[in-house]
Amino acid sequence: MFFNLQEEEKKMWQDNIRKVTPYTPGEQPKDKDVIKLNTNESPYPPSPMVQEVVRSVENNRNRLYPDPEAAVLTDAIAKYYNVDSNQVFVGVGSDDVIGMSFLTFFNSEKPILFPDITYSFYDVWADLFKIKYEMKPLNEKFEIVKEDYLVENGGIIFPNPNAPTAVEMQLDDIEYIIKNNRDSVVIIDEAYADFGDVSVLGLVNKYENLLVVRTYSKSRALAGMRIGYAIGSKTLISALKAVKFSYNSYTMNYVSICAGAAAINDDKYFKEIVSKVINTREKAKDTLKKLGFFFTDSKTNFLFATHKSVPAEEIFEELKKRKIYVRYFNKPRINNYLRITIGTDEEMEKLYEALKEIVK
């Protein structure tokens, strides 16, 4: 009888565990002797200014709590984008910023909206926080259909350029969505915007309901430091900070704060490495086209590619045997596509040589 009671109690507490399907990140191989083109990291090292700051940080500082406002970093970001410091929110990577934004802004009984093919963390956060959501299908060109977002909703989020499709939406079309959803918070995830032509940062003072999220993980070569930020109206940023400080005030460590400020202050280096990635990306389009690949017109630091005859999963596995890692998504509509991060010119040459063997 006692045993049965224990079993029943065990079942009851198990029923109260929150059950979610976690986000699956790109594989992080333990072997260092690989060409890693699967997680959209920068192929170049951080700014020399960042490296100098990291070397010079006093060890004694690490025994103290960091500034919860991360003022050194928020002030640097605000100055760079010519906004008020009260319009900037920083977090531990853009994932932290977006997750906090879901918790802060998406509390309506109405569903939030995002594309059916997009950053696969969005539905994970929605499930985790028990937020209703609807996924709006991209068209046959993997483009967002702006008219699909003219329905009642509790919020909207999508990346621009989109991921993993690499397709960039034009500014007028994004503004069309924002201005027709003034009763909802619209979040534009600009993780890859530095590699494209479009940003909505210029609209944050025009639309109080617009939040723009960015990251240091791609164009600023600091994925390991975990730095993300949001820019928006003072009302939105104030609400974000209130939720953050109710959850965990000290989220960003002192070294990351200093490194983040140094990175954004070294604009020359930032533009140099972004330009290198873009040039390599455009060369990659020409080379892969000759090998029988088709892809969207990428405005990111990766290509979303499919081959005319060889299945994507087969190419993925064959590349892996050669210690070249790309990303394969076994999901509806995109299960014959590969996401290939742009590496250095030398890394890309090795990729082309491998692909010539595989798709011959």
Image (cartoon, helix red, strand yellow):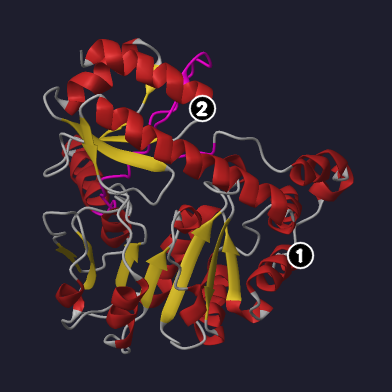
For the point 53% across and 16% down, the residue is: 32
Left or right side of 300 for 182: left
Q: Earlier in the sequence, mark 1 or mark 2?
A: 1
106 or 337: which is nearer to us?
A: 337
For the point 44% across and 44% down, the residue is: 301
Residue 275 placement (x, y as % from top left): 56, 46
Amino acid type indicated by mark 2 = Asp
Left or right side of 92 for 357: left
Residue 290 placement (x, y as % from top left): 26, 27
Task: Please tell me in which quadrant of the rendered image residue 289 appears.
Answer: top left
For the point 57% across and 74% down, the residue is: 241
Residue 47 placement (x, y as % from top left): 71, 43
Q: Quadrant of the N terminus?
A: top left
200 or 276: which is nearer to us?
A: 276
Q: Is residue 85 above or below residue 310?
A: below
Amino acid type indicated by mark 1 = Val
The circle on residue 270 is none
Pointer 1 residue:
72
Give neighbour class at mark 2: few <14, some 14-19, many 20+ (Cα, 10 Å).
Answer: some
Q: Is residue 1 above or below residue 266?
A: above
Give the secondary structure at mark 2.
Answer: helix
Does the magenta portion include 243? no
Magenta stretch: dominant secondary structure: loop
Pointer 2 residue:
345
55 or 239: which is nearer to us?
A: 55
Specify start and end residues of the magenta stretch as a single range: 16-42
